[in-house]
Image: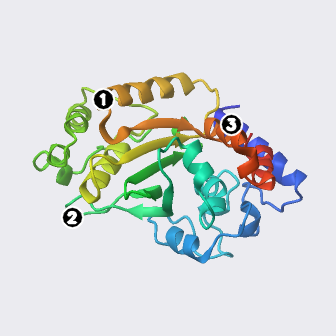
Amino acid sequence: MNGIDIIKTELIKWARNKNIEIDNDAYVKSMDDNFIVKLSDESLRDLKGGDGSEIKDDKTRTKIFALHSSSALVCNFFEYWRFRDKSALAKALKFNQGIKSLVYEQKLSMGMQGKMPNLDLFMILTDGQAVAIESKFTEWMSKISKKEPFAESYKVGDRWNDVGLPNCQKMVDKIDSKKEKFFYLNAPQLLKHALGLANMHSNKSELIYLYYNIDTSVSEIHKTEIERFKNTLKGELNFKALTYQELFQTFEKFNSEIDSDYQNYLKSRYF
């Protein structure tokens, strides 16, 4: 089995052990069954405002009903923290300050017309610094599309240079000219997030690539591409990559500050 099939198989086992009703495609019948806590009205509004058609309502089957939904993974990790003290989360993410707020599917303007990419998770720290998280579950296990990575509007002038990201600009130019290729890391998507983040906030903001790791025939290629991307940026946007496994292991260091039911749910479902 490939990595995607392995993940789906394990999630189906988990659902059956929990007596959660699913269909033949591993989608839950009741949306609430896909989450450790019921999504807040604010979170539902965030998700409905995104462009990925993740959710319509709690009865219409959409992407977020899938056991292997990337959005469900993000919500199961972060919804717990939305309306409570986030000190342990800040420490787990190695921030040197607290987290003021977090939202899903945040859109950031890139200073031009066209569709704005959605951030899976967007946080504001106590000093006003912005942090963007791009999350991946199984998506990175398939080769990225061969379509043109950047629309013509991105190529007008030097958009990344203009917001103080010269190393990002160099990578954009290399990808566009086919001198730089990525097969499993969606580098163009990350670069678009970088542009929006710097344009709307600051080039001192932080961009985190958070992904679910599983050893597959392509996992080493993916890791190598992440390192190549990171090394090329040379510290711009404080870019860092982190696996969900690493984040969960860090949570375990703060057992006294984190509800055991939350940790046990994550462990049984995803690890």
- Furthest-left residue in view? 157
Residue 39 x/y as whole percent: 65, 69
In the rendered view, does 136 fall on the left or right side of 238? Answer: right
- Camera-near label (2 vs 1) is 1
User: Which quadrant holds residue 249?
Assistant: top right
Q: Of the residues shown, which amino acid type is indicated by label 2?
A: Gln
Give the CA distance from mark 3 to mark 1.
27 Å
For badge 3, the amino acid type reads Gln
Q: Is residue 234 above or below residue 113?
A: above
Q: Could you classify mark 1 by the number of other residues whose Cα lies within 10 Å: few (under 14), some (14-19), or many (20 or more)?
A: few
Q: Using the numbered discs, state the Cα–Cα distance from disc 2 to disc 3 in whole angstroms.
A: 41 Å
| In-front residue for pair 52/81 | 81
Q: How many marks?
A: 3
In the rendered image, is residue 153 in sight?
Answer: yes
Q: Nearer the viewer, mark 2 or mark 3?
A: 3
Can the viewer see residue 142? no
Q: Which residue is mark 2?
A: 113
Residue 86: percent from left, percent from top: 59, 57
Q: Residue at x 46, y 66 (%)?
A: 50
Q: Position of residue 196 (x, y in %)?
A: 29, 55
Which residue type does callout 1 highlight? Lys
- In this orientation, which residue lies closer to the viewer: 207 or 256? 256
Indicate which disc, 2 or 1, sits on the residue closer to the N terminus: 2
Query: Badge 3: how crowded within 10 Å, few (<14), some, or many (20+)?
Result: some
Which residue is label 1 attached to?
Answer: 234
Residue ID for mark 3: 249
